[in-house]
Amino acid sequence: MNNFWYACEFSSNVTNKPKQIVMLNQRFVLYRNSQGQIVALKDQCPHRGAALSLGWVKDDCIRCPYHGWKFQADGKCIEIPSNAPGIPIPKRASLDSYPVKEKYGFVWLFYGDLPEEKRPTLPTFPEYIVKTMHPVYDEGIDNANYARLMEANLDFTHVIAVHRKSFGQRIPINKTIKYKVDKYDWGAVAKVKYESLGKSKSILNFLLGGRPELNTRLTLYLPNVTLAEISIGRDDRFDIKFGILVAHLPIDDNTTVVKRVLYRNILPITWLDNFFRKLDHKLAQEDTVVVATLDSQPMPKISEELHVAADALDITFRKLLQKHLAQSSNNLGF
């Protein structure tokens, strides 16, 4: 999908050295100029096609690693070392450049051709998460389709099967799950309350005075971000909160770079971050193992699979996906 802001990298990963990201079957290169602003260009020199991300940055410009051609932040080539001074630089000696913004610790790249005033706004995440909760960052590559992975993150009922060996067996789902989906221009949101976390005699049950409730709120931010808000508690007693923010970078139909931020209000101590990072990674991989086996990796049409009431948020996602993919094809003249 074009004409969207893609969350494509953690801000902390971009420095004054070229950084390659792969997304949408293309290579992009990011770097910071002397003012700390991020520059985003196509990572392919128009001369021989070398990856500029293997080159170097100097005077706010990037040099090709093959023949040293020098490109400005707008993608225009301003120097070819093998040419004598005064020789005109070919008009085709330029790179595609892309608007970028930074927000919530992410770099957002605009992939499309809309003028600035017509571009969608960046998403707004809940303030209580980004301002008061402790974040832990993780990233990796999953051998599965990005939309299929997003769909798993928007699924209220898969936990009892996919996560049955970790926490899913404690979530009772023995009735029809129905809920309201609220749609907006660039996404959708829904929430479900589970009456208890089961009959386990855990320390959690003791602290909360009985079996705690589990409230889950799942939000889709097109084109590639999901957010799970999880609250565990009962009445006004000890309330544990987590936020799981995930950016899915589609490399191709079967491969996705996944960048995750786990927010927590429990034990916000830095030396425990690695424990929570490993826990979040383990739970994410439980999803990936199953999603990677799906017969159709690119998202099928809604009519091609079976659905039940609990799939309402996923169906909304599919409808939005089909709508905007169709718009993108029309814009490209297909």
Image (cartoon, rainbow, N blue to C red):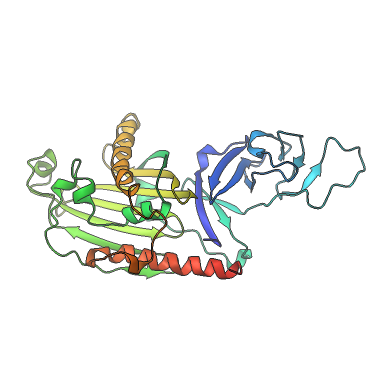
Query: Could you tell me which residue is drawn at 52 percent across and 57 percent down?
Result: 5
Specify whether 302 is left or right of 170: right
Specify whether 74 is left or right of 283: right
Instruction: Tell how many labels.
Output: 0
Q: Nearer the viewer, residue 257 or 231?
A: 257
Taking the image as drawn, is residue 127 in sight?
A: no
Q: Residue furthest front?
A: 295
Taking the image as drawn, is residue 108 in sight?
A: yes
The picture places residue 146, in percent across and down from the top left corner, at 42, 52
- When the figure is inspected, residue 196 is found, relative to residue 323, above or below; the finding is above
Query: Could you tell me which residue is drawn at 31 percent across and 43 percent down?
Result: 289
Q: Nearer the viewer, residue 156 or 123?
A: 156
- When the figure is inspected, residue 105 is found, relative to residue 82, above or below; the finding is below
The picture places residue 226, in percent across and down from the top left corner, at 38, 54
Query: Could you tell me which residue is drawn at 60 percent across and 43 percent down?
Result: 30
Specify whether 248 is left or right of 129: right
The picture places residue 138, in percent across and down from the top left corner, at 40, 38
Query: Could you tell me which residue is drawn at 59 percent across and 60 percent down?
Result: 112
The picture places residue 62, in percent across and down from the top left corner, at 71, 39
Name the image quarter holding residue 267.
top left
Quadrant for the C terminus, please.
bottom right
Q: Nearer the viewer, residue 205 or 156?
A: 156
